[in-house]
Amino acid sequence: MDKLIVKGGNRLTGTVKTSGAKNAVLPIIAGSILGETPSRLDEIPQLEDVKTICGVLEYLGVKIDSSEDHALTMDTRSITAYEAPYELVHSMRASFVVMGPLLARVGHARISQPGGCAIGSRPIDLHLKGFELLGAKITQDHGFIEATAPQGLKGADIYLDFPSVGATENIMMAACLAEGTTTLENPAEEPEIVDLANYLNQMGAHVRGAGTDVIRIEGVKHMHGSDHTVIPDRIEAGTYMIGAAMTHGDVIIENVLVEHQKPLLAKLREAGVTIEEDIDRIHVTCPGELKAINIKTMPYPGFPTDMQAQMMAMMTICRGRSTVMETVFENRFMHVVELNRMGASIETTGARGALIEGPAKLTGCEVNATDLRAGAAMVLAGLVAEGKTVIGNLHHIDRGYENLVGKLQSLGADIQRIKVQE
């Protein structure tokens, strides 16, 4: 079992490069199933979640060459299975996103009920509703969900009750090979949706309107492989921005798309952080005291729920009372207990609200990463805590941050990963 040891007090200074986006690369890898010839994907982050989704595709018959650094070649000419088993799917919810392209390509998909971080109810009913409207027959039994469309899928008008990212991706991919036109209303508008749509179009699909409140997909009979470079990870970039702010550092984040960061940049500036924007880099400094702010998580282009835990870590050392309202997931405050163990003053108000009084004097202790982004929050808190913070449950962090220790060390953080006896 590995743990992180973080000794607080060092300013973060220097330059760090953001990896490819975890939340974009997973559906793009799944979308490769739609192509009848190989694809080559660039800027692939080396993450546990990427290994998991590749394992799912290899089980389905896809041949994957990962010998090139941060690139994958996906040979999808032969799909030999239609079932993704429990042992590959249970650890990562995003693996359910293979259902749409698999259903479209071979007319049959059987996927184990998905797992992932326990940050709240993320029902897959929106995915299934979309598949049914496209003409699929859905059955559920023994922990599996099965979808069949022996006569092929047919275009349909689909309205999502909530702009779910996963459902938007799954339905969009399924509709690419459906007969006729599919109109998807109230879809997710995240940059990762746009990146997936760009990849699908390069493969021969006709997807229009990704990133807006209506997506139209004109079905095609066949799709081919393509080369694609994944967009930068806006959540990873944001995590380093907050680290720079909390440590009163001086950090340049490279390989970042500024237009994807607007809600976070606005809140950091409101807190007193100095930010200089360039085409593909952001320079973050924090010369003065951090001021309390209020955030409310929303679907994109609102403040991202995936930045809430990290921002709360920063709020613990801001002067005044900060508030957080979490509207996306109902169980995304598991990091509150861990931050309070370090000396923070956070009070939850119901399942979705929190009050943070600051600045608190944080002191290092033993804490756990209760989910992926909570793990990042623990690391950030450790950077400014007095003494040594020991962080466990690192498998969560490994799912979403490539070389977190090495990148923070390059910025001057005192952080190391050690093996401990169970």
Image: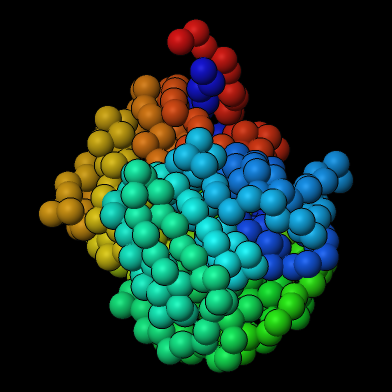
Does residue 129 appear anywhere in the picture? Answer: yes
Q: Is residue 371 left or right of residue 239?
A: left
Instruction: Say which residue appears at 69% left-offset and 45% top-offset.
Output: 58
Does residue 278 appear anywhere in the picture? Answer: no
Q: Position of residue 287 (x, y in %)?
A: 52, 55
Instruction: Say which residue appears at 25% left-offset and 36% top-offset.
Output: 337
Q: Position of residue 371 (x, y in %)?
A: 40, 41
Instruction: Say which residue appears at 45% left-offset and 78% top-offset.
Output: 135
Q: Is residue 310 left or right of residue 209?
A: left
Along the viewing direction, whichever of 327 and 52 lies nearer the viewer? 52
Q: Is residue 260 left or right of residue 86?
A: right
Q: Position of residue 154 (x, y in %)?
A: 52, 84
Instruction: Say which residue appears at 79% left-offset and 72% top-offset.
Output: 224
Q: Look at the image and name its color scheme.
A: rainbow
Along the viewing direction, whichever of 300 and 291 lies nearer the viewer? 300
Q: Residue furthest top?
A: 421
Q: Residue furthest left?
A: 350
Along the viewing direction, whichever of 284 and 369 lies nearer the viewer? 369
Along the viewing direction, whichever of 379 and 274 lies nearer the viewer? 379
Q: Residue furthest front?
A: 150
Q: Is residue 196 above or below residue 404?
A: below
